[in-house]
Structure formats: C-alpha cells, structure tokens
Image: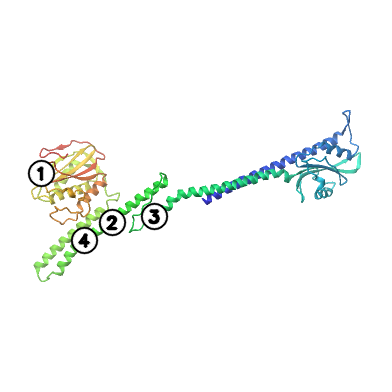
Amino acid sequence: MTAVVALTAAAMTISGVTGLALQLRATDARIDDSLTRAVSALRTAQVEGEAQPDGSRVPWSSVERLLLKAVEARVPGEHEGVLSTLDGTFFVRPADETRAVRLDTDEELMAWLRALPADDALAGFPRTVRTSVTEYRLVAVPVRLAADPDVAGMFVVASDRTAQNAGVWRIFLTYSAVGAAALVVTSLVAWFVVGRMLRPVRVLRDTVRRVTESDLSERIEVTGNDDLADLAASVNSMLERLERAFGSQRELLDDVGHELRTPLTIVRGHLELLDPGDETDVRATQSLALDELDRMQRLVDDLVTLATVDRPDFVRRAPVDVGRLTDDVLEKARGLGERRFVVVSRADVVVDLDAQRVTQAWLQLLANAVRFSAPGALVRLGSEVANGRLLVWVRDEGPGVPREEEDRIFERFHRGQADRVQHGAGLGLPIVAAIAAAHGGRVFLEHPPPGAGPGVGFVLDLPAVGLVDGEAESFDLVEPHR
C-alpha cells in the first residue's frame, strides 16, 4: 500500500509540475508576443513618419516627439508598464491606470536601463530583469533620428512577470492542496480497505503459526465469498485432511505396534522357556516362531500395499477380458480351501482395469468367504455389467455380518466377532476397499434376501472404463447376482 501511495503521489507531483511548467511557458510566450508587437509598432511608426491632420505623413522632427506619440499609442495591458527616456533620463509614461505598472518608481530598473550600452546586441529583444521589487520581462528599444542626432531616446515596455504568473501559481498551489488532501483521504481509505482485504491473510498466517503436529484443530473463520474466502476454505479443507491423515497415521502406528507386539511377545516367551535339550520342544517352538513370523510378514505386506494406494502407479489400467479373468480367479480360488466354488455369472466383455489388483481384491473376498464358512460349503462368485458398471462379487454361506458391524468391517485392524481363526490382521477388506477406490469404485456388502439362508455377499463396484460389449453368460445353478 505504501508503494501504491508513493507512486500515486509521484504521479500527481509529476503531472502538477508538468502542468505548472507548461502554464508558465505559455504565459512567457504571451508576454513575449505582446512585447514583440510593441517593438514592431514602434519601428513601423518610426519608418512611416508622423501623421498630419490632412492624412499625410512627414518625417519625425525630433526623438522627443516620436517617443511622446509612441507612449500615447501604447495602451498598457494588465501588469504591464510603458515609459521612455531621453539621454538616460526618464521622459514620459502613460497616465496612471490601476492595472498599469509604474516602471519609473523602480530605482533598480531605472539604473539598469541607464547602464545599457548604446550598441546593446539584445536591444529590441525580450529579456528578463530581476529587481528587489519584482521580476520583469521587457524590451528596451533605442530610438535615434537623423533629424535629431544629438538626442538618444529609449522606448521601454515591461511586463511584471511575477504578477502575470501569480494566477498560475495560485492554481498550482490549489491543485497541490487538493491533491495532498485527496492523497491523505485515499491513503486512509486504502489503509482501511487493504486492512479488511488482508485480514483473512493475517488470520491465515496466525492460524498456520498455531498449527502444530500435535494440534491440527485450528480453523479459519470464513466470511464473504471472494478469493480470500475461497483461500481460507481451502486451507481449512487442507487442515482437515492433515488432521485426518495424522490421526490415521497415529492410529495406524498404534495398531501396528499392537499387532506386532503380540507375535514378538509370543516368540520371545517361548524362546525364553525353550529347553534346548528337548528335541520335541525345540521343534514345537520352531514351528510356532515360524508361524508368528509368517503372520508378521503378511502384516507387513498388507501395510506396504495400503501405504502405496495413493501412488499414481498403484493401479495400472489395461484392456482385460473379464470373462477370462473370472475363470482365472476361479482356478486360483480352489487352492484357498475345501469349498465348492461356483461361477454364477460371467461377463464376457473387455474393460480397462488393473487385472492384478482386481484379482488381489477378488481373492481376498474369496479368502474371507473360506474363513467364515464350513468345509464343503458353497461359495458363489461372478462378474456382470449393469448400467455402465462392472460388478465383481462373492457370496458365501457363512454366519454373515452382524448389522452393528457393517460400518466397521472396512476399518483397518478390525476383526469381526465371527472370525474363527483370529490370525488375520484385519487388513483384508481395507485393501479391497483401497483397490476399489483406486479404480474409482467402491466395495459394499449385501445380505441375502429373506428366506435365502445364511451368508453374505461382497460386491466390487467398478466403472466399466473402455467397455467393449460381449455376450454375458449366466447359469441356472443359483439366481444371478442382482
């Protein structure tokens, strides 16, 4: 704001000084024009001679007569004076007029006129003379006649330059006063307006200073609907994301610490109680340690997967034959356990997706179905396209998911009450949800309709990007997924 006010003041000063200089120059030009015309009139009268009553003209008989007529013919303008001298002595001036300047009363000017040499090179040209009284712009014209050679006269016309420019200076001073007042008012208004405009920035600065890693609860009060209000809202959104991210990070660290502490405690306790001389005890402890290390390895792998979900290369789309992918997943699922895996529907279409990630998510849902169902139970799976969406699903005949746990099953490290094995880390379904979100989709569960028996279904709902239609195939073994 200071820079803007300074630039404004500089612009006003430059414009005012430039206007003053132009006006002073115009005044000088007007004065010089009047003086030049006075000299021209004198020269013309001197050449033409003295006018007679009959209209004829005769040569001037004396310098005194010529100067007298020249002074009588010159009507002084405002702030202008006229006089003549004979042999350096004041001779005549016009009658007193209120607007005329009495040149003969300025002793310094009269002394300067007397000191002019007879052969002055600037005779008859406008010049500036300063005295203690004022500043003059004048012409001093020597007058000599052949008929009167012994007398040296001088015709002087002078304008009070200071008085002529006084009006210009009054206008400039008025402009300066008004400009200074306007600048002060503008500065005060600008201070108020800029202060209001920058208040959100100061609030933003103070809020950011108060934000620490341990306290991200600070928020900026958003008022108005301008760009600064949008900035404050954006910063609030950023703080909310940071707060959630730090909260998730702390929660993740707490959960990881808890999950890793248990197997480490188990291994350490068995190693401390190990009898090196007992081969059976050594083998049992070795088996238990390896089993706990495998569980820790799975936990680390799952955490690495979740840590990379925000990377742009987490999902690498490519055209995939969904029908063939369904058959491949069926073959891989048979190694998960002794269950009857059945493909209920197969979408014979080509869709752009990451086959490896979708297979990972699909097999995770099938692994959950195996975990929560009895040996030999029926596990259905299928794929279909509906309303431009690719649906990949799994349905089991297990105990299902209690209504009170539906909102928590996709949280990290959450294990349901029906988990019989209790060796999972509770990261399977969060990984499925992350893969679905990375594809721009979602995962949700479906309860079977009333009277359809126990179990639950999980649906991976993905956008059918780059869909190339084929012939969908369904089977009559069970109802297709709806």
Q: Is residue 148 visible?
A: yes
Q: Residue at x 11, y 67 (%)?
A: 282
The residue to which callout 2 is attached is 249
Q: Mark 3 highlights which residue?
A: 207
Please tell me whether mark 1 or mark 3 is closer to you in this view. 3
Marks 2 and 4 sit apart, C-alpha to C-alpha, by 16 Å
331 and 179: which one is in front?
A: 179
The x, y position of residue 272, in whole percent, is: 16, 69
Other residues around mark 1 within 10 Å, as few (<14) / some (14–19) / many (≥20):
few
Q: CA distance from mark 2 to mark 3?
A: 23 Å
C-alpha span from label 1 to label 4: 38 Å
The answer to whether residue 335 of the structure is visible from this angle is: no
Work out whether 182 lies above or below 73: below
Mark 1 or mark 3: name the one nearer the start of the chain. 3
Q: Which residue is disc 4 drawn over?
A: 260
Q: Earlier in the sequence, mark 2 or mark 4?
A: 2
Residue type marked 2: Gln
Q: Amino acid at mark 3?
A: Thr
What SS does tag 2 mark?
helix
Front in this rendered view, residue 344 or 111: 111
- Lateral position of residue 302 relative to residue 380, left or right: right
State the image coordinates of residue 474 (x, y, percent, origin top left): 14, 37
**Quarter of the image where one finds residue 66:** top right
From the image, tell me which residue sits under label 1: 453
- Tell me whether the residue at label 3 lies in contact with that at label 4, contact meaning CB atoms closer than 8 angstroms: no
